[in-house]
Image: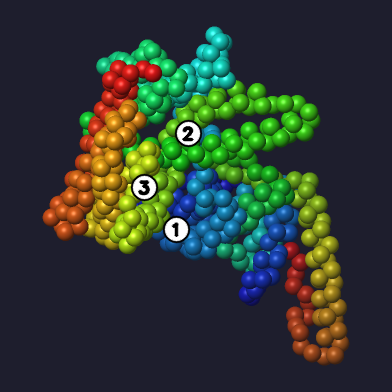
Amino acid sequence: MHITKDLVAASTTPLVLGILAEGESYGYAILKQVGELSGGRLEWTDGLLYPLLHRLERLGHVDAVWRTPEGGRRRKYYRITDQGRAELVEHHHQWAAVTDALQRVWDRAQSVGQPVAPVRPAPAG
Amino acid sequence: MDEDRTAIGHDDVEAQIAEWLAYLHRRRELSSADSEELEDHLRNRIAELTEAGLAPGEAFLVAVKRVGSLDALTHEFAREHSERLWKQLVLSGGGEEPHAGRTDLLAALGWALAAAVAVKVPAAFGWSLQDDPAFYARNAGLFALLPLLGYFARRRRASHATMAVLAALGVVGIVAANAYPLTDDAPVTLLTSLHLPIALWLTVGIAYVGGDWRSGSRRMDFIRFTGEWFIYYVLIALGGGVLAALTLGTFDAIGLRAEDFVGSWLLPCGAVGAVVVAAWLVEAKQGVIENMAPVLTQVFTPLFVLALLGFVGGVLWTRSTVDVERDVLILFDLVLVVVVGLLLYGISAREPAAAPGWFDRLQLLLVVAALLTDAVVLVAVGHRIGQFGFSANRTAALGENLVLLGNLAWSAWLLLGFVRTRARFAAVERWQTGYLVVYAAWAWAVVLVFPPVFGFS
């Protein structure tokens, strides 16, 4: 299944913030988690995650530190800030409103018998 | 949970990664930290893919493809870091060698501070700026340029022989400004205040090139430095003017009079300190920012050509003679100085091997127009010079005119040869860099020989 560019773009910030809310992480691991959460259906252009992370850093939603794991390469780790958590809550409210409204649309369409499958909404991650 | 299987072990993939990184490094939008982050990502992806059974070469290709088009990526980075598209000169001295940059900045600030202290020392012995302005006028070049001389001599690690020559010239400058019994309002006093800075500036040139003053290309470097330094100094002076005006205004608003502080501390100390600071800025930004003087040259050369041709045309059209006032020669000396400057900075930015182009023809036209203009003036002055007599000022003005005229006449000849592809451009360049010696000789002659010849009062 293909998810349109606009939807991907709209969901990146809450996804990244949500993943970082569970603990600090780095670019590649974040991408892996996005893949797992969406069951592989949410495909990002890998590189574009990094400008996004830098933007969140500039806005103060995340902090970044360079750390060198033992015997490994230097790597940039990102950690959510309090401001980032507040932003995540805000995103959550907005998305809840959107999905609520959409859910009603799907329900109504179902009741007039129009095929707007899937019958079951997409499995939550 | 960190999978650090980053070692791929295949040399060809390593080579491909290195190539990819080199490509990233060429993008100004990406800092080296960004490429490091992307490299880490790429290696993780390759490790995962090879683990899943792909050959390393294939894994590299897939990983690169998944990173996405570099154009799109750099576009996003540029949106996020637009400041990187502007080459920044930060006062920490730039990113490559922050430590060396800082040492250098401290050295420059040290010399600037020394200059600021030196300019206040005479006041401690009773020669204040208000009481004895002529003393400061005669010595302005020394106050401003001796610290710069020291800065470059140290920075270039000049040899002992060079140091000795520089010290000797500095002492000669001090003697010339102070040993002659010059009265304050004598014409030669003014000449000394104007020519000693020129003589000392060319001495700074010896320090700038680290003693290698015979080399034409090093001299050209010093010419480039001079143009950039001048622009930076003017900019700093503008900023200093704003600072002084605001200081006066704000203190006045709370009933404190800051005139004395601004007049006898801020302006003199700032003026001499800025000489070294501007030089340091030029040094620090040399490789970072495009030279400005050649850009201004390109803008103003056509305009000056029009102005000079207009002047010559006006003389022919109205058949009017130049109104030979006493100072007319000085005005036209300045015209020639500007023309030589335009010529010089046009040359300084030119690729010597390039074929003659429209700008070379324009420069030839500029020089010819300047020669015509000066000929008109010299003819007019020639009729009257006997009547006025050879005072110190007039002799100096005439001498300067001839020095510049000589330069331009031969430049015109060389440029003509070049435009007609009979001569190489290097000849024009060599002529200009060689001529610096003439300027130095003339400036020192005015400083050293004019006072005894024309009298001290």
The residue tagged with tag 2: helix, strand or loop? helix
When the figure is inspected, residue B237 is found, relative to residue B347, above or below; the finding is above
Please state the horizontal and vertical placement of residue A62, each as a whole percent of the image.
70, 48
Amino acid type, mark 1: Phe
Residue lying at the far top of the rendered structure: B125
The quadrant holding residue B378 is: top left
Mark 3, mark 2: which one is toward the viewer?
A: 3
Instruction: Please tell me which residue is depicted at 78% across the width and 80% down the height of the picture.
Output: A119
Q: Earlier in the sequence, mark 1 or mark 2?
A: 1
Residue B97 place in picture, x, y as percent: 46, 33
Question: Is residue B101 something one can see in this rendering?
Answer: no
Q: Amino acid at mark 3?
A: Asp
Name the residue rendered at 31%, 25% in the picture: B446
**Mark 1, residues whose alpha carbon is within 10 Å: few (<14), some, or many (≥20)?**
many
Q: Which mark is residue B60?
A: 1
Q: Circle 2 sits on which residue?
A: B278
Q: Residue at x 69, y 56 (%)?
A: A16
**Amino acid type at mark 2:** Ala
Which numbered mark, 1 or 2, is in the foreground of this view? 2
Counting residues from the N terminus, which is met first, the one under dot 3 or under dot 1?
A: 1
Distance between the Cα atoms at labels 3 and 2?
A: 40 Å
Q: Nearer the viewer, mark 3 or mark 1?
A: 3
Q: Is residue A85 above or below residue A37?
A: above
Mark 3 lies on residue: B323
Q: Are marks 3 and 2 on the same chain?
A: yes
Q: Is residue B20 visible?
A: yes
